[in-house]
Amino acid sequence: MSLKKVVLLVLLTITIKGFGQNSVTKINTKSGVHYHTTTVDFPITGTYLFEGGEPKVVLNTNGTGVYQLHDQPQRPVVWGIECNETGEPKFIKGFDSAAYTLWYSFTDGAENGEMAWYAVEFTLHFNSEKMFIQGERMKLFNGEKK
């Protein structure tokens, strides 16, 4: 096999592997090392509202966003859905739902001098086409009310 063919084969393999994998971030939390990704097979980015208003959560496609706790101002965050080392999201499948873990960390100031990560439940409900963060902040799959 000629050198050109070998180089072409190596480049093709690297390119396919690079485009085929999800972006994975390794994080250190109080419960140990975890991995997260912002690449999920569902349209999870957008604005999640509590009973139609604040407090809200905003998840941007680039892994940034806003997280607002009850009776608190909105704060900027980085976020991701828990996954394994290869980027495959971890979830628990229900009858018509799936439960994931959403990790977020505030970026406007370190908690106790270090970057603190918080885990909350993120659920998808397929029949109603609703997504929930912490069971209370909701967004529809397609962004329209049913």
Image (cartoon, rainbow, N blue to C red):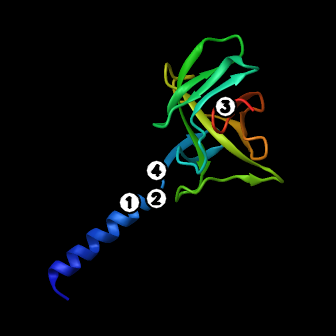
Tag 4 secondary structure: loop
Tag 2 secondary structure: loop
Judging by the rendered image, the residue that carries numbered circle 2 is 21
* Residue at far bottom of view: 1
Judging by the rendered image, the residue that carries numbered circle 1 is 18
Judging by the rendered image, the residue that carries numbered circle 3 is 144
Residue 24 is situated, as x and y percent measured from the top left of the image, at 49, 50
- Please name which of the two marks, 1 or 3, marks the residue nearer to the observer: 3
Mark nearer the N terminus (3 vs 4): 4
Left or right placement of residue 71 versus residue 22 in this view: right
Residue 119 is situated, as x and y percent measured from the top left of the image, at 67, 36
Neighbour tally class for label 2: few under 14, some 14-19, many 20 plus, Cα within 10 Å: few
Mark nearer the N terminus (4 vs 1): 1
Give the amino acid type for the residue marked by disc 2 in the picture. Gln
Give the amino acid type for the residue marked by disc 3 in the picture. Glu
Give the amino acid type for the residue marked by disc 4 in the picture. Ser
Q: Do the residues bearing badges 3 and 4 touch, measured as CB atoms within 8 Å? A: no
Image quadrant in which you'd find residue 134: top right
How far, Cα to Cα, is label 4 from label 1?
Answer: 9 Å
Q: Do the residues bearing badges 4 and 2 touch, measured as CB atoms within 8 Å? A: yes
Which label was assigned to residue 23? 4
Q: Quadrant of the C terminus?
A: top right
Q: Nearer the viewer, residue 67 or 114?
A: 67
Q: Do the residues bearing badges 4 and 1 touch, measured as CB atoms within 8 Å? A: no
How far, Cα to Cα, is label 1 from label 2?
Answer: 6 Å
Considering only vertical position in the picture, is 42 above or below 61? below
